[in-house]
Amino acid sequence: MLARRAKLSLLTCERLLKQGLRLRLPFLRGFATEAPPTPAQPSSSANEPTERILMVTPEMTEREYASRVVPGRAVLAPLRHEKTHGIPVAIIHVRGYQHRDLDLFLHFASHAASSLAIPVSEIIRLPTQRSLWTVPKGPFVHKKAQENFERRVHKRMIKAWDANDSVVDRWIHYIRSHPQPGIGVHIVRWRRAPVGIGRKHAERTSTTMLESQKLENITDRQRVEEVARNIVKQEMKAANLGDAAPKAIKEESETKETDSPEKSS
């Protein structure tokens, strides 16, 4: 009996499969006539990948590559400049809850760095920070019923080398002026200074501190005396000018008197 039932079930399954194939054949034929399959291209005539086509070659300079209009360049991987000295300049560290937001922002930052000729690393994935909370659903009767909450913070970073401070400032200003919602950005900078900058800074601060101390040590009496001296000097100058004016007038009158008899004669 069992063998007979198994045979009957197999026969019914075969009939159903045949019916399904007959129903699907017209649709499959229609799709096949509308879009015939394209033959496979040989390796000699196959197109090269876009990365090799858009790379800077010795025949094309970087300026020419940057001036070219390439459709969809923002979607492609950015141009990576080689490190010259390997001196770190900045680190951009981002955090967020979605992988796509982090990758999109760092892709944008890498394109901006390649436009400014800043050598940057690829996107570095950091360990995910996981936090768990267990909270009771309610007091009294529902106190034993608890609920678990989980939060995962994903992290990424890129590192920049061998760039001038002014160029890095412009890069960071451009990144901050176009923020990505849903992520947090932390930037670490390294600034280089010439040898002896500490001594110069100490001398400058010491001179300013001495000048400020001198001004603070001056009492009110000394300030009043200095103001009085300035007033006396100004009054003396005005008095000297006042005495000189009448003398000039007298000299002019005497010259006129001496000239008048000569004219009469």
Image (spheres, rainbow, N blue to C red):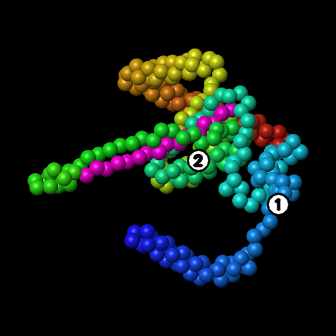
Name the residue beneath numbered marker 1.
41
Q: Is residue 77 left or right of residue 156?
A: right
Name the residue beneath numbered marker 2.
106
Q: Secondary structure at mark 2?
A: helix
Report the disc number at residue 251. Answer: none
Q: Which residues are magenta?
A: 147-162
Which residue is more in the foreground, 29 or 43?
29
**What residue lies at 46% left-to-right and 48% top-to-bottom?**
96
Q: Quadrant of the C terminus?
A: top right
Q: Is residue 173 left or right of residue 248?
A: left
Q: Return the disc, 2 or 1, that comes first in the chain's sequence.
A: 1
- Amino acid marked by disc 2: Leu
Is residue 150 rendered magenta in the image? yes
Is residue 47 rendered magenta in the image? no
Vertical arrangement, residue 148 with respect to residue 27, above or below: above
Q: CA distance from mark 2 to mark 1?
A: 36 Å
**What residue lies at 35% left-to-right and 48% top-to-bottom?**
150
**What residue lies at 35% left-to-right and 43% top-to-bottom?**
131
